[in-house]
Image (tube, rainbow, N blue to C red):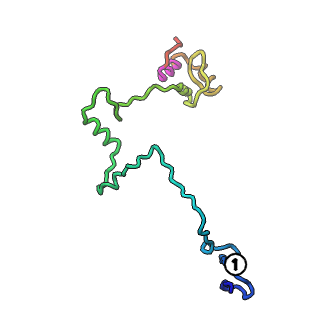
Amino acid sequence: MPKRRPGASSGEPDSGLSSVGGSGVPSPVSIVAPENSTEEVKEEPKYSFKNVAFQHSKKTNNKKRAWRSLKQIITLERALPWGKDAVHFSTIDALPSYKPPKKYSDISGLPAKYTDPQTKLFYANSEEFKTIRTLPSDIVAGYLALRRASNPVG
């Protein structure tokens, strides 16, 4: 005698699969894998940069570690006897930049695309150029001194 689903009519044989909410979609419980099926066992890839013997310090010790700020690290480094060639946080000097320095207008401070060939002042637009051409030479020399540029106007 065939099995019947609960709620199924008496004339309808059961197919062995139960559906979710009567939608005709088999429920995950009713799907059974065959006994002779072979399952592929996927191994986790072993990465060369991972140390298998690594144990995190919090797992091995019950102590909580206090984090140090940069100021504390620098203070501790200054107290230690370092050689003259040692490199640490307080001695690192930056190399000179390979990028050209940005130019800003001597009049407005906006990014300047242009340089006046006569006075060597930087300017951003035509209005500033008109203003630069009307400036006396001592004011131009003052702008160049502020920028630490040589004074070509004499």
* Magenta stretch encompasses residue 147: yes
Against 11, residue 109 (above or below) is: above
Q: Nearer the viewer, residue 31 or 108?
A: 31
Magenta span: 139-148
Image location of residue 50, percent across then percent down: 44, 46
Residue drawn at 50 percent across, 20 percent down = 144
The outermost residue toward the front is 36
Q: Is residue 1 above or below residue 25?
A: below
> Is residue 109 positioned above or below 30 on the image?
above
Q: What is the magenta segment's predominant secondary structure?
A: helix
Residue occupying image coordinates x 46% and y 43%: 48
Could you say whether the residue bearing mark 1 is in a helix, strand or loop?
Answer: loop
Q: At 53% from the left edge and 13% from the top edge, which residue is drawn?
A: 152
In percent of width and height, residue 23 lies at: 70, 75
The one of 57 and 145 positioned closer to us in this rendering:
57
Q: Quadrant of the N terminus?
A: bottom right
Task: Give the left or right position of residue 125, taking residue 150 as reference.
Answer: right
Q: Which residue is mark 1?
A: 15
Question: 149 or 145, which is in the foreground?
Answer: 149
